[in-house]
């Protein structure tokens, strides 16, 4: 007798026939549409694993809370990039990205207030002034909060809003305008630099409580910065000299902006009546 015939004669063991998977015809308890059953394994993972991985990659968290609000957050981080493209390893805020956002925010009926969050080392003078001018010309309430640092040309952006905050440990560096690269040593070059510096001084003093004399004194102070002139203000110091309105963080900025939005809406209703 061959092994083949022997195994064929053993009932229930050989040959082995795997049981059929239950289907719509064989399983009366299976719903007509598997997607209707929230407890199935398929419905628990479809579309979520990929989204979770992308969220972790982009945001560093598994879930980002979504909230519909009438307040828009505008971030100015890293180095403000102007007419020249900076190296890819630099964290930058591109002014050609910020300007269209500001135009859209001005036109959007859903947005009623804008909070500007700054943590910048400065950057291109004309690009920074352009952003500051646009923020100051918005008709909607604006509040800025300096977290970490608002240095150099970040100072005009910080004071361009209706009200400004600075974190207790945040710092702001005030110094004269610098140039990178080759500078042609002619009187016209220095005259242009002086006029550009005057633009910065006039803007900052017009949108804050610091005087021109005090701001220029901070700008040209010697001995505080190594190998350079200028001043570093930290938290309360920026408020004491009149540059920033108040020491506070995100909560204080949002609370103040909400009250400004309510006043702004009340004013609009009064004009319409």
Image (tube, rainbow, N blue to C red):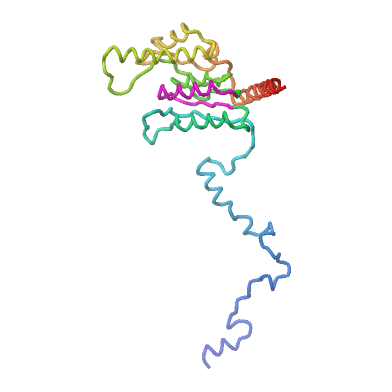
Residue that sits furthest to the bottom in the current view: 1
Residue that sits furthest to the left in the current view: 185
Residue 227: horizontal and vertical position, in percent? Answer: 34, 15
Q: Residue placed at 46% from the left, 23% from the top?
A: 130
Residue 126: horizontal and vertical position, in percent? Answer: 41, 22
Q: Count the marks: how many?
A: 0
Q: Residue placed at 69% from the left, 73% from the top?
A: 25
Q: Which residues are magenta?
A: 114-139
- Above or below: residue 256 compared with residue 186: below
Whether 88 is among the magenta residues is: no
- Above or below: residue 90 compared with residue 136: below
Residue closest to the eye, 136 or 253: 136
Residue 190: horizontal and vertical position, in percent? Answer: 32, 13
Horizontal relation, residue 216 to residue 164: left or right: left
Residue 196: horizontal and vertical position, in percent? Answer: 39, 16
Residue that sits furthest to the front in the current view: 273
Quadrant where the C terminus sits is top right
Residue closest to the eye, 20 or 103: 103
Q: Residue placed at 40% from the left, 10% from the top?
A: 220
Whether 123 is among the magenta residues is: yes
- Name which quarter of the figure residue 45 lies in: bottom right
Residue closest to the eye, 103 or 22: 103
């Amino acid at each position: 007798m061959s092994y083949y015939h022997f195994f064929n004669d053993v009932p229930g063991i050989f040959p082995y026939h795997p049981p059929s998977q239950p289907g719509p015809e064989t399983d009366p308890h299976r719903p007509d549409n598997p997607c209707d059953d929230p407890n199935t394994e398929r419905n628990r993972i479809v579309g979520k694993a990929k989204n979770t991985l992308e969220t972790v990659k982009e945001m560093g968290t598994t879930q980002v809370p979504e909230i519909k609000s009438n307040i828009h957050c505008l971030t100015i981080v890293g180095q403000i990039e102007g007419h020249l493209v900076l190296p890819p390893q630099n964290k930058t805020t591109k002014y050609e990205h910020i300007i269209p956002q500001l135009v859209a925010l001005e036109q959007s009926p859903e947005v009623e207030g804008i909070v500007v969050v700054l943590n910048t080392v400065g950057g291109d003078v004309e690009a920074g002034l352009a952003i500051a001018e646009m923020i100051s010309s918005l008709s909607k309430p604006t509040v800025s909060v300096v977290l970490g640092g608002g240095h150099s040309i970040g100072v005009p952006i910080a004071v361009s809003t209706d009200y400004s905050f600075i974190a207790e440990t945040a710092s702001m560096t005030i110094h004269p305008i610098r140039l990178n690269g080759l500078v042609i040593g002619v009187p016209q070059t220095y005259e242009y630099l002086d006029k550009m510096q005057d633009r910065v001084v006039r803007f900052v003093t017009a949108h804050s409580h610091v005087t021109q004399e005090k701001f220029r004194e901070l700008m040209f102070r010697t001995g505080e910065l190594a190998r350079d002139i200028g001043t570093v203000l930290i938290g309360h110091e920026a408020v004491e000299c009149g540059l920033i309105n108040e020491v506070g963080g995100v909560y204080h900025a949002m609370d103040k902006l909400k009250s400004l939005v309510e006043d702004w809406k009340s004013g609009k209703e009064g004009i319409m009546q």
